[in-house]
Image: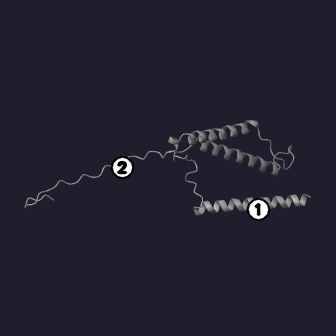
Amino acid sequence: MTGVMILCGYVACGFLGLLAFTILLWIWRGKIDLTTLLNEGNGQASMSRFQLLIFTFVVALSLFELVEKRSSGDFPDVPHGTFPDIPQGVLTLLGISASTYAVGKGISYSQPSLLAQAPTPPSPPPPPTPPATPTGDGVVN
């Protein structure tokens, strides 16, 4: 039975690796555009999106580091290959960050005036036309 579980683990890791490689390739080729990743519907930057992105990356990288240290044997009192306990405070902070993003999204989509494109600066006035000059026969050019 453990052989089947190991094989399933390798198949799942291979699939996720292939999926990640495909996504990175699409980003590289321009099929996935990340230039507006942190923008709201009106084109302005969103602090709640940035906060959620940063918190998620910090927690994910910390969890990855803890899992790696446990599998390498850096913690002798912890059984090998066990998943680390995630403190409730970390989960609470992630929940607050996600809730802030969701509430901000709800507010911005409930008010259509907030979704309108940000006003563009006025264009400069056209250059003045040169004054008309009379010709010798009395016709103004």
Q: Nearer the viewer, residue 60 or 141?
A: 141
Viewed as shown, does residue 1 lie left or right of 108?
Answer: right
Amino acid carrying mark 2 in the image: Ser
Local crowd size for mark 1, using a 10 Å CA cut-off: few (<14), some (14–19), many (≥20): few
Q: Residue at x 57, y 57 (%)?
A: 33
Closer to the camera, 47 or 116? 116
Residue 30 vs residue 78: left or right?
A: left
Residue 27: mark: none
Of all residues, the one furthest to the right in this rendering is 1
Quarter of the rendering occupied by the C terminus: bottom left
Dot 2 corresponds to which residue? 123
**As rendered, which of 138 and 11 lies closer to the eye?**
138
Give the x, y percent position of residue 56: 67, 45
Q: Residues within 10 Å of mark 2 (few under 14, many from 20)?
A: few
- Amino acid carrying label 1: it is Gly
* Residue 30 image point, x, y percent: 57, 61
In the picture, the quarter occupied by the N terminus is: bottom right
Residue located beneath label 1 in the image: 14
Report the label total.
Answer: 2
